[in-house]
Image: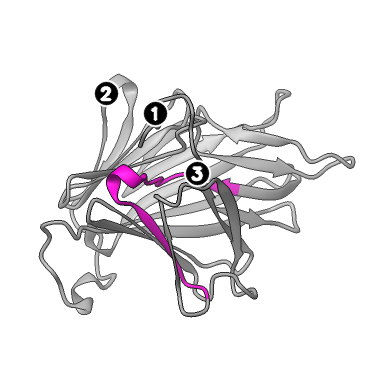
């Protein structure tokens, strides 16, 4: 997910709602209204991982590289971060006619009530400049909100969060739903490699601030509140690595 910026300070948020369809009990719409955070514990996991845990989901992230995963406790489905680059996301700078891309990895993690605050220092030279991401549970623990900001001394062109995350495969009967026109369903078993970008509220873009992802009967809904967000979908046919044949 790519967000454009025209100023030195960038702040936005997006939310991830877990829809546990496989073996889950259907609830009326009013039952998932944002009327509380539910039970939440922030704890350490394997090899120093930090985590957020609710009755419905478990989010864990590595301070070593920013790689993360979300486990849907109802369906037992795990949603993963970028399979090609271990990082939370990527930032593009705009300065002196150049637009370098820098990874958001190796976060400094601080526990805040009721979630986690991640601080990144993406500039190559020693600098106090920062990008900060706050992750917290909402909707009685069914939703995770990612809220981020950057310091004024970082010339931000764009920032990518949830970078190539929540990927699905044909083995998992996965597909993505895009709210464009009457709706577009993009299956993982197309057998083609491609990349599509959907601007928010643009022609042939996302008519609503959301995307849906489904695999193994479980669903995940990504929403945002910034009209300058670009949602990017990639289809790849890996010839090496753990995703070959999946």
**Figure quadrant of the C terminus:** top left
Please name the residue shown 17% across and 77% down the image: 28
Label 1: how many Cα within 10 Å (few below 14, some 14–19, many 20+) = many
Residue 222 seen in this snapshot: no
Kindly indicate whether the residue at mark 1 contacts the one at mark 3 (C-beta within 8 angstroms): no
Label 3: how many Cα within 10 Å (few below 14, some 14–19, many 20+) = some
151 sits left or right of 60 in the view: right
Disc 1 or 2, which lies upstream in sequence? 2
Please name the residue shown 39% across and 50% down the image: 189
Task: Answer whether residue 137 is magenta in the image.
Answer: no
Q: Which mark is residue 62?
A: 1
Disc 3 or 2, which lies upstream in sequence? 2
The CA distance from mark 1 to mark 2 is 9 Å
Please name the residue shown 84% across and 39% down the image: 98
Residue 21 seen in this snapshot: yes
Disc 2 element? helix
Magenta residues span 160-180
Colour scheme in use:
one colour
Disc 3 or 1, which lies upstream in sequence? 1
The residue pinned by badge 3 equals 164
The residue furthest top is: 47
154 sits left or right of 148 in the view: right
Please tell me whether mark 3 or mark 2 is closer to you in this view: 3
104 sits left or right of 184 in the view: right
The residue furthest front is: 191
Q: Percent x, y for residue 229?
A: 60, 61
The CA distance from mark 3 to mark 1 is 17 Å
Front one among 225 and 23: 23
The residue pinned by badge 2 equals 46
């Amino acid at each position: 997910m790519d967000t454009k910026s025209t100023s030195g300070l960038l702040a936005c948020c997006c939310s991830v709602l877990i829809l546990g369809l496989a073996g889950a009990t259907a609830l009326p719409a009013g039952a998932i209204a944002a009327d509380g955070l539910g039970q939440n514990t922030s704890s350490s996991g394997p090899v120093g991982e930090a985590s957020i845990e609710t009755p419905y989901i478990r989010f864990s992230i590595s301070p070593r590289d920013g790689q993360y995963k979300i486990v849907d406790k109802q369906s037992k489905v795990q949603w993963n971060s970028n399979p090609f680059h271990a990082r939370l996301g990527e930032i593009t700078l705009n300065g002196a006619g150049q637009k370098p891309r820098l990874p958001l990895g190796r976060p400094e993690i601080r526990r805040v009530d009721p979630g986690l605050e991640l601080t990144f220092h993406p500039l190559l030279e020693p600098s106090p400049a920062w990008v900060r991401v706050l992750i917290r549970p909402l909707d009685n623990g069914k939703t995770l909100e990612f809220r981020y900001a950057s310091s004024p001394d970082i010339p931000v062109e764009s920032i990518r969060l949830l970078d190539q995350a929540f990927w699905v495969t044909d083995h998992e009967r996965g597909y993505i739903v895009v709210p464009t026109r009457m709706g577009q369903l993009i299956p993982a078993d197309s057998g083609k490699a491609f990349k599509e970008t959907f601007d928010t509220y643009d022609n042939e873009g996302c008519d609503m601030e959301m995307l849906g992802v489904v695999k193994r009967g479980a669903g995940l809904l990504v929403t945002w509140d910034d009209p300058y967000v670009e949602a990017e979908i990639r289809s790849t046919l890996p010839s090496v690595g753990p995703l070959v044949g999946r």
